[in-house]
């Protein structure tokens, strides 16, 4: 482990959620859902979040999933599970929406 102090994900979770929400807002604010654009938006949000999070705390490997879908009456069920050190590792989910887009980003932080 070296000299690096082991910081639990819970200590950076609020900052991770805020940063993720800001990245989503930057990429999707005032956009209207179009299927042809959703894949590019998904990639841009995911990459933006990863790049921003790497500056928050270098003691974690981050994994990001992003779902962008048209906001309508269809259902969406998602689940994830991890086997990790719950004292250090963690995850959070950020949901963002406007009148036509629903975006859900999951961020997993695994301590190095």
Image: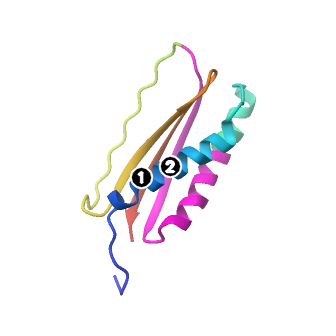
Task: Decide: is 13 above or below 79.
Answer: below
Residue 89 belongs to magenta span: no
Task: Decide: is 37 above or below 55.
Answer: above
Q: Is residue 91 left or right of residue 28?
A: left
Q: Quadrant of the C terminus?
A: bottom left
Q: Mark 2 points at which residue?
A: 18
- Percent position of residue 46, x then y: 59, 49
Q: In this view, does 37 lie to the left or right of 17?
A: right
Label tally? 2
* 10 Å crowding of disc 2: few (<14), some (14-19), many (20+): few
Whether the residues at callouts 2 and 1 have beta carbons within 8 Å, the answer is: yes
Residue depicted at 40% across the width and 54% down the height: 13
Task: Decide: is 13 above or below 38.
Answer: below
Residue extent of the magenta highlight: 43-72
* 10 Å crowding of disc 1: few (<14), some (14-19), many (20+): few
Residue depicted at 36% across the width and 41% down the height: 80
- Percent position of residue 31, x then y: 72, 30
The quadrant where residue 98 appears: top right
Q: Mark 1 points at which residue?
A: 14
Q: What SS does tag 2 mark?
A: helix
- Percent position of residue 17, x then y: 47, 48
């Amino acid at each position: 482990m070296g000299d690096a102090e082991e910081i639990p994900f819970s200590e950076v979770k609020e900052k991770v959620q805020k940063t993720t929400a800001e990245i989503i807002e930057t990429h999707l604010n005032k956009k209207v859902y179009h299927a042809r654009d959703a894949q590019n938006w998904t990639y841009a949000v995911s990459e933006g979040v990863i790049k921003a999070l790497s500056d928050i705390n270098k003691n974690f490997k981050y994994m990001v999933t992003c779902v962008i879908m048209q906001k309508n009456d269809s259902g969406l069920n998602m689940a994830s599970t991890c086997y990790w050190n719950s004292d250090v590792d963690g995850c959070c989910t950020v949901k963002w929406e406007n009148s036509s887009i629903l975006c859900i980003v999951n961020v997993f932080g695994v301590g190095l």
